[in-house]
Amino acid sequence: MNFHRKLPIPQEVKAEYPLTKRMMEVKAARDEAIRAVFDGRSDKFILVIGPCSADHREPVLEYISRLRKIED
């Protein structure tokens, strides 16, 4: 293999681009919202869509509407 440059490991990226206090607060709030779904404290649901299927808004909205019909 012919490498052009080494990809940084996650710790290096975190060190180069540290989170601000506000970013940490937002992440903590989002983590708690997700935890509430898994714990059953929230009636929301989580939908995980990979980047390949979420590159355009229309397919994502179509997929969500199909899932909604299945849920109903």
Image (cartoon, helix red, strand yellow):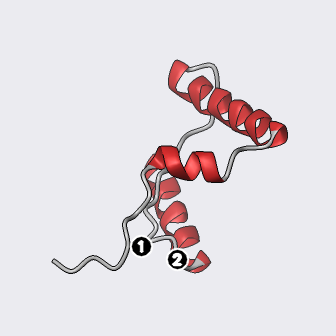
The three-letter amino acid code for the residue at tag 1 is: Cys
Quarter the N terminus occupies: bottom left
Q: Position of residue 39 (x, y in %)?
A: 53, 19
Indicate the secondary structure of the residue bearing disc 1.
loop
Q: Position of residue 14 (x, y in %)?
A: 59, 46
> What residue appears at the point 69 percent right and 38 percent down from the top-left corner?
27
Q: Position of residue 35 (x, y in %)?
A: 57, 26
The answer to whether residue 72 of the structure is visible from this angle is no
Q: Is residue 64 above or below residue 35?
A: below
* Contact check, label 1 and label 2, Cβ < 8 Å: yes
Say which residue label 1 marks: 52
Q: Give the side of residue 58 with respect to residue 53, left or right.
A: right
Q: Position of residue 21 (x, y in %)?
A: 82, 36
> What residue appears at the point 67 percent right and 53 percent down from the top-left corner?
17
Indicate the secondary structure of the residue bearing disc 2.
loop
Q: Which mark is residue 30?
A: none
Say which residue label 2 marks: 55
Rate crowding at label 1 as few (under 14), some (14 to 19) or many (20 or more) other CA atoms within 10 Å.
few
> What residue appears at the point 74 percent right and 36 percent down from the top-left corner?
24
Q: Give the side of residue 30 with respect to residue 12, left or right.
A: right
Rate crowding at label 2 as few (under 14), some (14 to 19) or many (20 or more) other CA atoms within 10 Å.
few
The one nearer the camera, 52 or 26, is 26
How many marks the image carries: the answer is: 2
Q: Give the side of residue 28 with respect to residue 71, left or right.
A: right
Label 1 – label 2 distance at C-alpha: 6 Å
Q: For residue 7, what is the image quadrant?
A: bottom left
Q: Is residue 30 above or below residue 9?
A: above
The one nearer the camera, 19 or 3, is 3
The answer to whether residue 16 of the structure is visible from this angle is yes
The one nearer the camera, 21 or 49, is 21
